[in-house]
Image: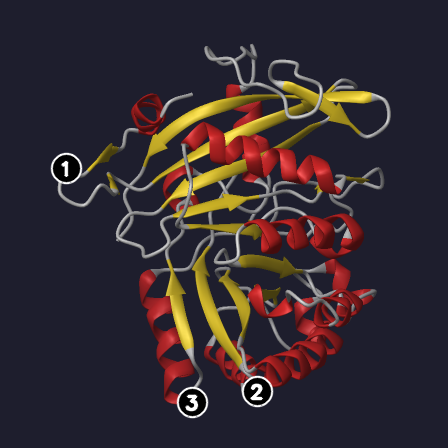
């Protein structure tokens, strides 16, 4: 696939002055299907006016066992691990499809838990680190402390932007949103992340998605302050993407402003994040819902993509017995502020 066609697919064009891609922010989603019918999603984001505009968002498993209550993806006891070289295939496919050669990040965020697949995810991270020395890697965890400890033992750990899906504090309150809190107390992850951050001289992110009437009160903000000031952390506030699978609602702009103001008044480092997901109705497992809307009937892409191992078009081996096929759902232009 040549560069000109890649730009047409994404609705982007190259500036005649700078040679850089220009255009509205957008997301291209890939639906990967195994021979036995299981499906998993990945995506490529282009965020305009950003120093590193491209983000490749990766899954780590097929299905997820945790069942976070704001997520559209139900908990499954049959979650399967994606092998490292299959993760590499997804990265390479994403780079090829979007004609990306530089200025990108790789992210294990927003779908599934990477630390239940430590060996394969870490092998893929090492490959990224070796192949692309300037690429940052994002890893988000629901709160698996052992994964953060293992991350700290890796030579490439300083390349990782660690994020913890906190959402509420203390753990007794958080359990209302994140059932995994019962088996994986986030306090242990906070301690491990603080140790890692002090050793590397790097801050970790505490993700807070505000849910109307659940975790958006001034008392909730003050509780987050207690956690955020316990180590080298910053807080990222995100808007919730309402969807039909869960009863939660997004907070008003006024409530979000007040929550943010309280954090800043307590000297908490905080950012407000406007994701592409709020514009195109994805995030928190909602790519699964989008799949249901757009995947029937599935059609292969109009171009041939050469496989990396088998030489087959658009397929590669998945696990021991099945093949993984992909169809890009198509690019959708979105606006972000």
Residue closest to the far left: 17
- The quadrant in which the N terminus is found is top left
Which SS class for mark 3? loop
Residue 226's tag is 2
Residue pictured at 53% horizontal, 51% vertical: 132
- Residue tagged 1: 16
Kindly tell me whether residue 303 is visible in this rendering.
yes
Q: Position of residue 124 (x, y in %)?
A: 68, 48
Which SS class for mark 2? helix
- Residue tagged 3: 266
Residue pictured at 33% horizontal, 70% vertical: 257
> Could you tell which of marks 1 and 3 lies nearer the N-terminus?
1
319 up-or-down from 80: above or below: above
Q: How is the protein colored in the picture? A: secondary structure
> Could you tell which of marks 3 and 2 lies nearer the N-terminus?
2
Q: Position of residue 77 (x, y in %)?
A: 84, 41
Count neighbours of disc 3 (C-alpha within 10 A) and say few if under 14, some if 14 to 19, many if 20 or more: few
Occupied quadrant, residue 196: bottom right
195 up-or-down from 53: above or below: below
Count neighbours of disc 2 (C-alpha within 10 A) and say few if under 14, some if 14 to 19, many if 20 or more: some
């Amino acid at each position: 696939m040549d560069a000109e066609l890649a730009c047409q697919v994404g609705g982007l064009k190259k500036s005649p002055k700078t040679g850089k891609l220009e255009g509205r922010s957008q997301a291209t989603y890939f639906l990967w299907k195994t021979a036995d019918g299981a499906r998993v999603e990945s995506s490529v984001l282009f965020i305009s006016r950003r120093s590193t505009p491209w983000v490749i968002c990766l899954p780590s498993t097929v299905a997820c066992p945790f069942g976070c209550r704001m997520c559209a993806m139900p908990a499954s006891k049959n979650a399967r691990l994606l092998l490292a070289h299959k993760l590499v295939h997804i990265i390479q496919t994403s780079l090829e499809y979007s004609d990306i050669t530089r200025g990108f990040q790789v992210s294990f965020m927003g779908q599934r838990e990477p630390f239940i697949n430590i060996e394969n995810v870490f092998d893929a991270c090492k490959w990224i680190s070796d192949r692309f020395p300037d690429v940052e890697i994002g890893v988000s965890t629901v709160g698996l402390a052992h994964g953060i400890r293992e991350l700290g033992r890796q030579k490439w750990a300083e390349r990782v932007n660690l994020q913890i899906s906190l959402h509420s504090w203390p753990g007794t309150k958080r359990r209302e949103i994140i059932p995994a809190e019962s088996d994986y107390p986030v306090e242990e992850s906070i301690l491990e992340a603080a140790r890692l951050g002090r050793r590397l001289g790097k801050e970790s992110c505490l993700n807070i998605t505000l849910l109307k009437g659940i975790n958006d009160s001034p008392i909730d903000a003050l509780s987050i302050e207690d956690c955020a000031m316990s180590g080298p952390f910053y807080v990222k506030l995100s808007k919730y993407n309402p969807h039909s699978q869960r009863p939660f609602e997004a907070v008003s702009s006024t409530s979000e402003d007040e929550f943010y103001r309280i954090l800043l008044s307590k000297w908490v480092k905080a950012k407000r994040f406007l994701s592409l997901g709020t514009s195109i109705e994805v995030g928190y497992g909602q790519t699964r819902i989008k799949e249901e809307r757009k995947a029937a009937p599935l059609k292969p892409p109009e171009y041939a993509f050469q496989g990396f191992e088998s030489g087959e078009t658009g397929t590669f081996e998945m696990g021991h017995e099945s093949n993984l096929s992909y169809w890009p759902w198509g690019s959708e232009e979105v606006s972000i502020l």
